[in-house]
Image (cartoon, rainbow, N blue to C red):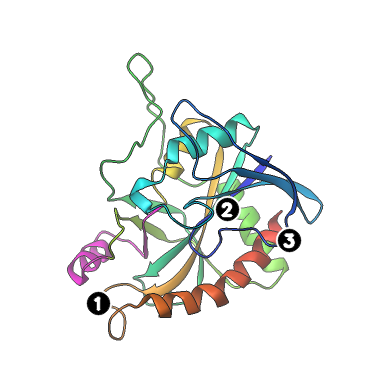
């Protein structure tokens, strides 16, 4: 069973034939929102709004453990996480869709593991995204003529503030191509529960020091409105 976790610009899944809206109580608290169960293009799918239905949760306050645990409890085995990100690499500018293959984690203080005393999980995270699922995204993109960038390093920062120009310079030196706030710990939690996980990142702005002038939410919203249309086309195709 497939689940889609929507981030900024994707708080609802257009085209989803809704069958149920499920409130799941977990050992880690409540998920960001009810999990919607339905059909997309005739295929069963679950959808979860990462930041809540009204986009009220900041990146560092999302209950990632509850989100991932809840999805697994409903029988989900594959997850596609959709994220809005900033571009560091010049080739990954606004409206570019990236299917990243690596992560550098700069977050801190988040509940980032299901490990507990007596149950320590040392999950292999060499390749943080499931390659089979990545390839399915790339093949679907080709079939529907959605241009995507195959591969890239996602630098996950704490948020909710945007980064400084010096921080982006550091991320670039570390090998990061894009920067966002929600890839972690979502990816590692899915790995700990043996769930396939891949990411669709829409670049909505050039990162600090790479943009012309200051980064404004109005500019980001304009790109979100345009770019998420292509993301939805890709999701329709891969489902």
For numbered disc 1, what is the local secondary structure? loop
Rendering coords of residue 48 (x, y %): 57, 48
Image spot of residue 153 (x, y percent):
39, 58
Name the residue at 73% across, 61% down.
Answer: 15
Quadrant of res 232: bottom right
Q: Residues within 10 Å of mark 1 (few under 14, many from 20)?
A: some
**Where is 102 relative to 195, above or below?**
below
The numbered mark, 3 or 2, whose residue comes first in the sequence reads 3
Q: Which residues are magenta?
A: 163-182
Residue 144 picture quarter: bottom right
Q: Which residue is mark 1?
A: 209
Mark 1 or mark 2, which has the lower sequence index? 2
Q: Secondary structure at mark 2?
A: helix
Q: CA distance from mark 1 to mark 2?
A: 30 Å
- Measuring 32% from the left and 77% from the top, which residue is drawn there? 215
Residue 15 circle label? 3
Relative to 117, is 193 above or below? Answer: below
Identify the residue shown where x is 42% and y is 41%. Answer: 63
- Label 3 crowd (10 A; few <14 / some 14-19 / many >=20): few
Residue with the mark numbered 2: 134
Kindly tell me whether residue 95 is visible in this rendering. no
Nearer the observer: mark 1 or 3; the answer is 3
Q: Quadrant of the N terminus?
A: top right
Quick one: 165 or 160, which is closer to the camera? 160
Which of 223 and 128 lies nearest the eye of the viewer? 223
Drawn side of residue 84 relative to residue 74, left or right:
left
Drawn side of residue 189 relative to residue 196, left or right: left
The answer to whether residue 201 shows anywhere in this view is yes
């Amino acid at each position: 069973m497939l689940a889609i976790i929507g981030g900024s610009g994707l708080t609802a899944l257009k085209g989803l034939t809704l069958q149920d809206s499920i409130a799941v109580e977990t050992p880690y608290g409540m998920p960001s929102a009810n999990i919607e169960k339905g059909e997309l293009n005739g295929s069963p799918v679950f959808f979860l709004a990462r930041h809540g239905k009204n986009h009220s949760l900041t990146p560092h306050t999302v209950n990632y453990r509850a989100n991932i645990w809840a999805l697994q409890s409903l029988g989900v085995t594959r997850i596609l996480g959709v994220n809005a990100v900033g571009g560091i690499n010049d080739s990954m500018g606004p409206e570019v869709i990236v299917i990243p293959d690596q992560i550098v984690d700069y977050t801190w203080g988040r509940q980032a593991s299901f490990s507990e005393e007596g149950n320590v999980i040392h999950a292999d995270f060499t390749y943080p995204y499931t390659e089979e699922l990545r390839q399915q995204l790339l093949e679907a993109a080709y079939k529907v003529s959605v241009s995507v960038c195959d591969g890239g390093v996602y630098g996950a920062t704490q948020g909710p503030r945007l980064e400084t120009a010096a921080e982006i310079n550091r991320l670039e030196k570390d090998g990061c191509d894009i920067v966002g706030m929600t890839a972690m710990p979502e990816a590692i939690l899915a790995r700990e529960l043996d769930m396939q996980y891949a990411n669709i990142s829409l670049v909505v702005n050039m990162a600090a020091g790479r943009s012309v002038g200051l980064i404004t939410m109005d500019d980001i919203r304009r790109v979100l409105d345009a770019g998420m249309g292509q993301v939805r086309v890709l999701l329709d195709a891969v489902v």
